[in-house]
Amino acid sequence: MEIDSVSEAELKENGFRSTRRTKLICTIGPASCTFEQLEALAMGGMNVARLNMCHGTREWHREVIRNVRKLNSEKGFSVAIMMDTQGSEIHMGDLGGASSLKAEINQEWTFTVRTFDGGVLPESTCVVNYDGFAEDVKVGDELVIDGGMVRFEVVEKFGPDAKCKCTDPGRLLPRANLTIWREGHLVRERNAMLPTISSKDWIDIDFGLAEGVDFIAISFVKTADVIKHLKSYITARSPGGSTSVFAKIESSDSLKHLEDIIQVADGAMVARGDLGAQIPLEQVPSVQHRIVHLCRQLNKPVIVASQLLESMIEYPTPTRAEVADVSEAVRQRGDALMLSGESAMGLYPEKALSVLRTVSLRMERWCREEKIHQTIRLPELSTALHERISEQISISAAQMANKLEAEAIFVYTRQGYMATLLSRCRPDCPIFAFTETKSVRQRLNLQWGLIPFRLDFSDDMESNLRRTFALLKARGMMKQGDLIVAVSDISTADMLQSIQVRKIP
Ligand SMILES: Nc1ncnc2c1ncn2[C@@H]1O[C@H](COP(=O)(O)OP(=O)(O)OP(=O)(O)O)[C@@H](O)[C@H]1O
Ligand SMILES: CC(=O)C(=O)O
Ligand SMILES: [K+]
Ligand SMILES: [Mg+2]
C-alpha cells in the first residue's frame, strides 16, 4: 500500500478529523525548482506542482517533472503535475533578462514589436509578443499590465513603437499579460481571432503528454469547443491515457459559456489574475463564488488561483486581507488553492505554503464546528444505472458518516469516479480513496477531502477491507474500534456496488 509520508504523519499525529481537506498547488519557478526545494514543498503539503509554459524552456520543465517523479518514487509522495499553456493572448517579452522593472508615475516607456540583438533592451522599453500590436493600438488607449498592477497611456505611435506614459506605477514582471482598453472597453481587434491553443501550445501539449503530466490547464478558454477538441486529441494520441483537461476561466468570453465549458472540462480554475483584467475587479469575488458553486454542482474539481498571498512574494507574513481571502475560498469549499509568484519566484515559498495550510485547517475546523454545511442541492449527474447507483451510494455514505460521526469513509475505486462523487458531498470526515494505479492516485490528489492510496485490489471486497484494516493498523494510522463507512464500485457477478459500516477489528 502506498501513501505519502506527510499524510501518514498528519494522520498519526492529529487523528483523521484534522487532516487538511483543501488541496494546495504550487507554481514552480526559479525559487522552487531544485530537488531539495521541491521536497521541502512536498513536505509542506504541496499536492500539485504547476508548470507555467509562459516561462522557461522545455528542458527546464522536463527537469522539474523528473525531479517531482523522483520525489514521488523515492519518498512515497503523490505530487501531481499540472501544465499550464501560454495561450495566444498578448503579453510582454522577458524584460531583457531582468527579474522585474519598476515603472514610475509619468515615466515614458516604449512598447514595441521590434526584436533586439542578443535580447538587450534599451532603457524603459518593453517588447510585446503580438505582431499586430503596433497597428491595433491607438493614441489615447490604456495599456493594462498584469491585470492592473501597472497602467500606461499611449501618447504617440512610431511604426513598430508606441510611446506610453505610466499612469499607475508598479513593478513590471517578465511575460506579464497585457490588455488594451479604449473608452472603458477591452479592445479585441485581430487578437480575438487568434486560436486559444497556439502552435507553441500544441508543441507544449505534445511535450506534456509525452512526459505524462496529470493535468493540462488551458489558458484563456473562450468556448467549450476547444476543450472538446483537446480532449479528443488526447484520447486519440494516448488511448487509455489519463491526462485531465482543466479550463482556466480568465476571459470575459468564457463567462458567457461558463456552464458549457465546465460541463465538458475535467475541472476548472478561477484564474483571477487575468480575469480581473477583463472584467471589473469588483465583480471577481461574485464570479469566483459562481464558478466554485457550479463546479460542485457539475462534479468538477475547481482551483482558486492568483494573488492569494501576493505580499508574501516580498514579505514573510501575509496581510490580514490575504488571510481573509484564503479563508473565504476555503469556506466556499473549493477543491484547491494555488500559489503563483509566491512559490515561483518569491522570497518565501515554504512560508507561503505553510500559511495556506494553517489557514485552510483552521477554517475547515470552524466550518465543521459551526456546522455551516451549505445545504446546496446537488442535482443528479447521470441517467445511466451504474452511475446513478454510484451517486446514490455516495450521498448516502456521506450522510451516514456525518450522522454516525464515522472516522473516515473508505472508497475502493478503479477509475476514481466514486471518490470524486464522495468528495462532491464534502462530508465531515476524510475520504480514504484506494485505487490501483499511480496515475489515478495522483489525479485524485487535487480533490477536496481525498487521501489517495495505491493498493492492488482483489475482486473480493471483504478481502480488500481486511487487508486495508491490517495495513493501516500496522502503520499506526487506525485503531481497534474506529468506525468507518466503506463503499466500492468494484463489481462482481451478483453485486454491482456496495456500502457497509464497519468497526476496525
Ligand atoms: N518557470 C518559470 N521560470 C521563471 N519565472 C517564472 C516561472 N514560472 C513563473 N515565474 C515567475 O512567477 C510569476 C508568477 O507566475 P505565474 O505562473 O503565476 O504567472 P501568471 O501571470 O499569474 O500566470 P498566467 O501566465 O498563467 O496568467 C511570473 O510572472 C514569473 O515572473
Ligand atoms: C493563473 C492565471 O493564469 C491567472 O490568474 O491569470
Ligand atoms: K499560463
Ligand atoms: Mg492567466
Image: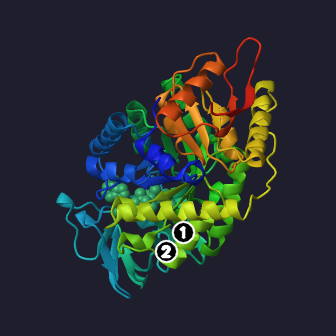
- For the image, the number of numbered tags is 2
- Please identify the residue farthest to the left as the structure is shown: 118
Q: Give yes or no for contact between labels 1 and 2 (Cβ–Cβ under 8 Å).
A: yes
- Please identify the residue farthest to the bottom as the structure is shown: 106
> Which residue is at a point 37% across and 69% down the rendered structure image?
313
> Which residue is at a point 57% across and 73% down the rendered structure image?
324
Comparing 456 with 250, the one in front is 456
Residue 175 appears in the rendering = no
> Which residue is at a point 80% across and 35% down the rendered structure image?
392
How packed mark 2 is, by other alpha carbons closer than 10 Å (few <14, some 14-19, many 20 or more), is many
> Is 125 placed above or below 218 here?
below
Comparing 311 with 453, the one in front is 453
Label 2 SS: loop
Q: Amino acid at mark 2?
A: Gly
Mark linked to residue 148 = 2
User: Which residue is identified by label 1?
Assistant: 277
Instruction: Say if disc 1 is inside 8 Å of ligand 2.
Output: yes
Residue 323 appears in the rendering = yes
Instruction: Say if disc 2 is inside 8 Å of ligand 2.
Output: no
